Amino acid sequence: MAGEMAAAGGGQRVPRALLRQQEWITLVVRVALAAILGIAGFAKFSEAEGLQKVAVSSYRILPQSMVAPVALGLPVLEMALAAMILLGFATRTMAICVGLLFVVFIAGIISVWARGLAIDCGCFGGGGQVSKGQTHYLREIFRDLGFLVLAAWLMVFPRGKAALDRWLGL
């Protein structure tokens, strides 16, 4: 059985079969995470500025002076991270940034749920107040936890096929 495990980067012990496929799995994870971030960012970016602000302000977390910069900056950040992840540039660093972003998203959803607010998260556009029966906080939290797992994979296994990191020797 000892022969079925191998050391990966950082000293982790992983099954040899997984290690043989790791670079392909990393490529698939990069494409999936980039698609998620790109779709979310584009959906927000293509909305009217007023709707973006409604989505951010409905969380009632930020001071009013921060709502517009976050509403306008978040879609740009998501699309930039999507591009970097897709290209495989600074993959581990970008995965850490994405992971932190999902932790913030999860904390925001937990916060509105704990305070009894009824909002659409606005994760893929939209957002704002909804009736109590239209909230899906638990599903949104688990969805974002799944996205966080994808980011964690890239933190642990950043080296993948078709990555700028590999071509640039990073």
Image (cartoon, helix red, strand yellow):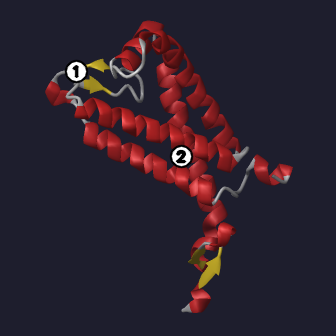
Q: Nearer the viewer, residue 56 or 44?
A: 56
Residue bearing mark 1: 130
What amino acid is found at the position of numbered circle 2 in the picture? Ala
Q: Position of residue 32 (x, y in %)?
A: 53, 46
Q: Position of residue 143 (x, y in %)?
A: 37, 44
Residue at horizontal 20%, vertical 28%?
116
Q: Position of residue 14 (x, y in %)?
A: 57, 75
Residue bearing mark 2: 32
Residue at horizontal 22%, vertical 21%?
130
Which image quarter: residue 157?
A: bottom right
Characterize the local packing of mark 1: few (<14), some (14-19) or many (20 or more) Cα atoms within 10 angstroms: few
In screen coordinates, is 148 left or right of 58? right
What amino acid is found at the position of numbered circle 1 in the picture? Val
Q: Residue furthest front?
A: 63
The numbered mark, 1 or 2, whose residue comes first in the sequence reads 2
**Mark 1 vs 2: CB contact within 8 A:** no
In screen coordinates, is 35 left or right of 116? right
Q: Nearer the viewer, residue 39 or 98?
A: 98
Q: Position of residue 139 (x, y in %)?
A: 29, 42
